[in-house]
Image (cartoon, rainbow, N blue to C red):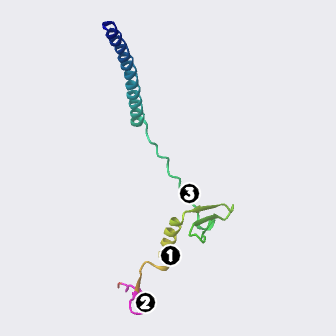
Amino acid sequence: MEEMEGKVKGSTKTIFKHIAVYGVIVIVSIASFIIGFTYHKLTSKNEIPPKEINRVLKKDVSVAIDETNNLIIINNETGDYTLFQDSIGNTIFNLYAKTVWGQHNQIVTNVETKEVVTQKKPKKK
């Protein structure tokens, strides 16, 4: 019986030694991965590319809005075009409409007749 207990104790000690060795290896591997990931994250710089601004003359391009409200800017010389999202088209169209129509105009809706009336602000003397 004592021999059996000795064998069981010896085998459990070796099993725990193997588990401890593999556990230390796993913990060290995970810790080194975390340290490497954190180091890379802290030392890498996010470089923002410079903004590209293309200035063109009004006579060199045509502006159009298609049926889905996408803005199209067409180069008159080459025929190349750039398609922009509908929200950009709406924003630019609204800005353009304000300058053409005039920012000094004020829209008033008559509640009783549901009629839209445009009123101009009086000019200051």
Q: Which residue is mark 1?
A: 97
- Give whichever of discs 2 and 3 has the lower sequence position: 3
Q: Secondary structure at mark 1?
A: helix
**Crowd rating for badge 3 (residues with CA inside 10 Å; few <14, some 14–19, many 20+):** few
Give 48 or 68, whichever is nearer the viewer.
68
Drawn side of residue 93 relative to residue 77, left or right: left
**Residue visible at 47% across and 46% down?**
48
Give 94 or 13, whichever is nearer the viewer.
13
**Does the CB distance between marks 2 and 3 fall below 8 Å?**
no
**Residue visible at 52% across and 71% down?**
93
Quadrant in which the N terminus appears: top left
Extreme residue toward the front, this view = 1
Residue 106 against residue 27 in the figure, above or below:
below
Q: Secondary structure at mark 3?
A: loop
**Crowd rating for badge 1 (residues with CA inside 10 Å; few <14, some 14–19, many 20+):** few
Distance, label 2 to label 1, CA atoms, is: 23 Å
Q: Nearer the viewer, mark 2 or mark 1?
A: 2
In the rendered image, residue 121, in percent from the top left (x then y), is placed at 38, 84
What amino acid is at disc 1? Ala
What amino acid is at disc 3? Asn
In the rendered image, residue 80, in percent from the top left (x then y), is placed at 66, 60
In the rendered image, residue 100, in percent from the top left (x then y), is placed at 50, 77
What amino acid is at disc 2? Lys
Distance, label 2 to label 3, CA atoms, is: 45 Å
Quadrant in which the C terminus appears: bottom left
Extreme residue toward the top, this view = 3
Magenta segment range? Answer: 109-123
- Give whichever of discs 2 and 1 has the lower sequence position: 1
Extreme residue toward the bottom, this view = 113
Drawn side of residue 81 relative to residue 87, left or right: right
Q: Which residue is mark 2?
A: 114
Q: Which residue is mark 3?
A: 54
